[in-house]
Amino acid sequence: MIKNPNCDNLICEQCIVRAKSAFKNLTTLEYQNLYAQKVCKFYKRGEIIYQEGHRLRGVYCVYQGKLKLYKIGPEGKEQIIRFALPGDLIAFRAILSQESACMTAQAIEDAVLCHIPAKTFLDLARENPNFSMHLIQISCKELNESNKFIVDLAQRPVKIRLAQTLLLLLDTFGVDKDGFIDVILTREEIASIVGTATESVIRYLSELKKNGLIQLNSKKIKILKPNELEKMIKF
Amino acid sequence: MIKNPNCDNLICEQCIVRAKSAFKNLTTLEYQNLYAQKVCKFYKRGEIIYQEGHRLRGVYCVYQGKLKLYKIGPEGKEQIIRFALPGDLIAFRAILSQESACMTAQAIEDAVLCHIPAKTFLDLARENPNFSMHLIQISCKELNESNKFIVDLAQRPVKIRLAQTLLLLLDTFGVDKDGFIDVILTREEIASIVGTATESVIRYLSELKKNGLIQLNSKKIKILKPNELEKMIKF
DNA sequence: CGGCTCCTTGATCAAGGTCAAGACATGTGG
DNA sequence: CCACATGTCTTGACCTTGATCAAGGAGCCG
């Protein structure tokens, strides 16, 4: 684990997360340009990368660590919309549509991010149609995810949405060596994904535990019967 | 009102909805190509243009009429995600990301749509960076709308969401000569925008009416005090 | 060790969903 | 043009879900 790397030595073309990123099929020249323009930075757990409403000067590529992306609701309550992992590009939509950030990005564990200036990124998007197509596709996929979640929020009860969220977390973060979902979230954070109260999350988690579908170890969650959870969410 | 126009005579470059559409800044050559490829069709109120999950062979440009775009929830209940009006392009995300339709499109009044084959559209998107940028921006805006609505669904009560929906409808459809919102929706359809039960919509509508904020005339709604509604949803 | 933060549980309560019944409106075919 | 059937609206009664409040316990860090 690199704790606070001398980031400027990271060569984009040889980056370990390149294959997972939107930058996977650039030309050597384009990589060199990225490398020349990017600035890498370390963020401590809990640190905020940028805030909803802020003007941004570029996009970020996650090199290491995990981020949560959330909006603040009318009563100041956070609503987690999605997560970002190594290889993910964040804030590019704000740059493309010249708007201010529509979410807050915060590190949920120590992270390293590369910042790419808006101009560099926009030039790339304009000149490489494969790249811009890829961006459109990411956006479309995300729009579809959001719309599906709207239906769930409007039509499914908390218990089901929690089951869905557990499977989503499993899918997003995978498992650690002991089989636990490889992320640490507070109950409150889980509640702010599901769209419910912290206490409801706790109650339904312990119900799932009682029924043997999951195992809990403080903040760590292991899914014992993914099929049973799948069955719950299929009606 | 053209009822069943001889659509093939509609010249894209001279189209009355051109200025409102994503096609507003094409070259004459590009317009000619569109005109050569497009096929125009009339849809009766209630008719379905395409269904969620279907493979599509092109995009549609709304020439006349109003559409609702919805997903079907787990219990078969419809959830209206958005509307489309003259000038709007629909289904283009499915075409761009080569997926099947993520929503059902249905005419809520008699409509005329132009169908543009996938290839024509994709070529245009690839060759005209301004056009593809515009598409990205539409998508980003919509994604942001959806994400905002997720927060509202998760954190705001039905009464407030109904007030928001009324203002949204006003903004989307404008008013007719008598000052009523220029669209006819059943209470059930309104409920499926708000994400609630039909009866709840009816109850809160009559409460708003009792308080003098709105006026009802069968399915038509007039907003008497937009400021009061704004006040409700603010803070 | 003391002060955090976070977790957990129980009790209570309100929002809003569901059910049922009747009124009203709309459209269709005879 | 009427009569019937169907769809939509409305209201009331009831009940469930899940939010809120309160209090105690566990774990963690300086």
Image (tube, coloured by chain):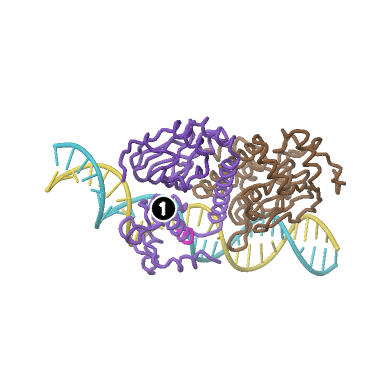
Chain colours: A brown, B purple, C cyan, D yellow
Q: Is residue B206 left or right of residue B89?
A: left
* Viewer-closest of B91 and A213: B91
Question: Who's the residue at 59% across and 63% down the image?
Answer: A75
Amino acid type at mark 1: Ile
Q: Is residue A133 left or right of residue C2?
A: left
Give how far across and how far down residue A103 sits, in percent: 64, 54
Give how far across and how far down residue B40 sits, in percent: 39, 35
Q: Is residue A73 left or right of residue A87?
A: left
Q: Residue B161 magenta-drawn?
A: yes
Q: How many numbered marks appear?
A: 1
Q: Residue A192 magenta-drawn?
A: no
Give how far across and how far down residue A51 sits, in percent: 69, 57
Residue A235 can be seen, yes or no: no
Question: Who's the residue at 75% across and 33% down the image?
Answer: A27
* Viewer-closest of B223 and D3: B223
Q: Which residues are magenta?
A: B158-162
Vertical comparison of A218 with B113: above or below: below
Question: Who's the residue at 79% across and 46% down the image?
Answer: A38
* Viewer-closest of B109 and A45: B109
Q: Chain of mark 1?
A: B
Pointer 1 local density, CA inside 10 Å: few below 14, some 14–19, many at least 20:
many
Question: Who's the residue at 44% across and 36% down the image?
Answer: B51
- Place residue A165 in its image quadrant: top right
Which SS class for mark 1? helix
Q: Which residue is mark 1?
A: B190
Residue B136 can be seen, yes or no: yes
- Place residue D30 in its image quadrant: bottom right
Give how far across and how far down residue A192 sits, in percent: 62, 54
